[in-house]
Image (cartoon, rainbow, N blue to C red):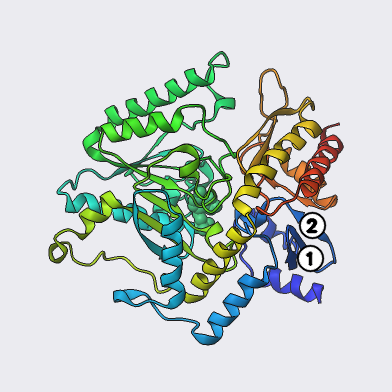
Amino acid sequence: TNDQLAHWDRESFFHPSTHLSQFARGEAPQRIITGGEGVFITDRDGNRLLDGFAGLYCVNAGYGRRQITDAIAKQAHELAYYHSYAGHGTEASITLSKMVMDRAPEGMARVYFGLGGSDANETNIKLVWYYNNIRGLPQKKKIISRWRGYHGSGLVSGSLTGLELFHKKFDLPLSQVVHTEAPFYYRRPDPAMTEADFTAWLLAKLEETIAREGADTIAAFIGEPVLGTGGIVPPPVGYWQGVQEILKRHDILLIVDEVITGFGRLGTMFGSQHYGLQPDLITIAKGLTSAYAPLSGSIVGTKMWDVLCQGTDENGVFGHGWTYSAHPIGAAAGVANLKLIDELGLVENAGKVGAYLRRAMTDAVGDHPNVGEIRGEGMLCAVELTSDRATRASFDPMGSVAPKVAGEMLKRGVIARAMPQADMLGFAPPLCLTTDEADQIARVTGEALRATLG
Ligand code: PLP
């Protein structure tokens, strides 16, 4: 019964990303989800909700896809597990590696599979360190990341993350990680700056950081093509071109974290293709399997691969591996998912319907006095809330309003994400969203905003 589940939950379940006082108060679970189809999920109380966030930006193909669940079942019956160490593979893991590399941007050589985005970023940093040790540059180890970046919750990946919540009380970030400014035009230091001025300012800050730390101590720069959890923020004009030019000049590798943007979300297979990026490493997870099973990957560029594999005896084994690396069930889910994304034209749909969603959102709430900005790219949209449009001031306390608006939306059958430590509503629906469903999200956002703020 629901009561029994609520009791067991209260007694046993340490939910992630949940205020600890809720456990202390013995609060019942928020919602028990039982099913899903397309962009909708259902709960045990019989509610049907439009999931405007695709779980956590991950159910790209939509819920209830039989092609994927059948492939998982078939794999589970035939061979639920074998490892991928020492050259072992399965049909599914080998096929998926081929499919990933066929879709990857130019210049990439191999894919190393993991479980989730955080562990893929741990792998990436170890690859970078290993690579520089092989090159005889053991002092070149620091990683530059951005404030507001999100790269995971592990010790290294949580250090790369540029959000205070993920550092506070953990003694993070680790000393090898240095943060630089977030490319967030709405929050530029001087409102008079044009977008081009702001880009120039960001690039100057990056140059300053490199000069201060010393280029010979910096191994890599990591960034999401569009900042995700830090606020769904597309970069200002010329940003990525400028960053890449600086990195090349200083022999600093580029790690592109495509955990959100990989496999279609920006209307291109990878965000790297959208912004003309030439990564040395790419992080993939979420959309790789549309979250039907946990699987991630680190796609290694040719430049690094050639060094890792030269003088093989001397370089030895890359001493890093997960029991579940390339897990057959995850791999089978990935193969079926990538086929489905192609068959349904979801990459193209993400570009088209994503742009439609932002237009519909602008029509619905663009004039509201507490809406500062509506932004996004592909199937990503953020509504930035402010207590004062002219000064762009935050609400007091910051982050107090968006959860209320999201709560009002939930009552009206739409899930939006109140972004952490901000007054922003985030939308990242499944890539199969239709224009009617986009209209529903926009209409409900308007109703909820008026119900909360007038
Ligand atoms: N990188 C990015 C860009 C992410 O958005 C996330 C998760 O949201 C991660 C890494 C971490 O992935 P995971 O939660 O699967 O460990």
Q: Residue furthest bottom?
A: 78
Seen from the viewer's position, the closer of residues 169 and 166 is 166
Q: Residue at x 31, y 65 (%)?
A: 320
* Quadrant in which the C terminus appears: top right
Q: Quadrant of the N terminus?
A: bottom right
- Vertical arrangement, residue 292 with respect to residue 299, above or below: below
SS category of the residue bearing label 1: strand
Q: Residue 366 lies in what quarter of the image? A: top right
> Within 10 angstroms of label 1, few (less than 14), some, or many (20 or more) residues?
some
For the residue pair 409 and 439, the one nearer the viewer reads as: 439
Above or below, 95 relative to 170: below
Foreground label between 1 and 2: 2
Amino acid tagged 1: Asp
Q: Position of residue 389 (x, y in %)?
A: 71, 22
Per the image, label 2 sits on a secondary structure element best described as strand
Q: CA distance from mark 1 to mark 2?
A: 8 Å
In the rendered image of this protein, does residue 97 appear above or below residue 228?
A: below
User: Are discs 1 and 2 less than 8 Å apart at CB?
Assistant: yes
Residue 329 appears at what percent x and percent y?
Answer: 52, 75
Horizontal side of residue 393 vs 172, given as left or right: right
In this orientation, does residue 292 appear?
Answer: yes
From where the camera sits, is residue 172 visible? no
Residue underneath mark 1? 43
- Which residue has dot 2 on it? 49
Crowding near pointer 2: few (<14 within 10 Å), some, many (20+)?
Answer: some
Disc 2 residue type? Leu
Q: Residue at x 43, y 21 (%)?
A: 200
